[in-house]
């Protein structure tokens, strides 16, 4: 009987020890600050833009809210990476003609949390993109980043306010 009790206590001790080691691994990689807040998936709810289209005709101002906006960001804070995609449509007015221009950005990269209000994504295709955070709530935020892209008619250079909401 003593032998069974001893084996039971020993087995119970091993179970608690194994659980404690798992917890230690988790606390060793404990997330805090902006990394902890962003860890997980966010939907892109809206994109506002402000900037210009630089053409041979000159600089054409761009400003408004993107139409048909969809997308998401999946922040993997412990791994230091993020996957993202944003699709929206902006409008360019040339003379009296309004032309829709699709904006599609998707990729993945390493992420660095610079402060409580700024992070950077180092994407192999797009390079280093800095995001400045404003209007942070318990479940979302607005992240502002610069988007530049050569098009057939010129170069788009805009600041995009990306509204993210936790899934």
Image (cartoon, rainbow, N blue to C red):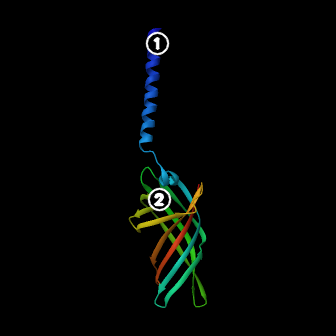
85 over 6 or under it: above or below: below
Q: Position of residue 15 (x, y in %)?
A: 46, 27
Residue at label 1?
Answer: 4
70 over 153 or under it: above or below: above
Q: Nearer the viewer, residue 117 or 40?
A: 117
Tell me if residue 165 can be seen.
Answer: no
Residue 144, numbered circle: none
Query: In the drawing, does residue 20 fall left or right of residue 101?
Result: left
Q: Position of residue 33 (x, y in %)?
A: 49, 52
Tell me if residue 55 can be seen.
Answer: yes
Q: Secondary structure at mark 2?
A: strand
Numbered-mark total? 2
Residue at label 2?
Answer: 83
Q: Residues within 10 Å of mark 2 (few under 14, many from 20)?
A: some
Position of the C terminus, as image quadrant, is: bottom right
Dot 2 or dot 1: first in sequence order is 1
What separation in Å lies between label 2 and label 1 (alpha carbons)? 52 Å
Q: Position of residue 17 (x, y in %)?
A: 43, 28
Q: Nearer the viewer, residue 52 or 117?
A: 117
Q: Residue at x 42, y 51 (%)?
A: 79
Query: In the drawing, does residue 43 fall left or right of residue 131?
Result: right
Q: Residue at x 52, y 85 (%)?
A: 60
Q: Quadrant of residue 164?
A: bottom right
7 over 124 or under it: above or below: above
């Amino acid at each position: 009987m003593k032998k069974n009790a001893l084996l039971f206590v020993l087995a119970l001790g091993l179970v608690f020890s194994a659980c404690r080691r798992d917890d230690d691994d988790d606390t060793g990689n404990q997330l805090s600050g902006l990394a902890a807040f962003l860890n997980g998936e966010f939907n892109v709810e809206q994109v506002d833009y402000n900037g210009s289209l630089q053409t041979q005709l000159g600089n054409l101002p761009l400003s408004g809210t993107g139409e048909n906006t969809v997308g998401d960001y999946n922040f993997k804070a412990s791994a230091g990476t993020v996957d993202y995609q944003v699709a929206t449509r902006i409008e360019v007015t040339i003379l009296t003609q309004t032309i829709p221009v699709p904006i599609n950005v998707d990729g993945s990269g390493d992420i660095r949390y610079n402060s409580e209000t700024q992070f950077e994504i180092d994407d192999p295709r797009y390079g280093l993109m800095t995001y400045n955070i404003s209007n942070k709530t318990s479940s979302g935020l607005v992240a502002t980043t610069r988007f530049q892209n050569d098009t057939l008619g010129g170069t788009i250079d805009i600041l995009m306010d990306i509204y993210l909401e936790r899934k």
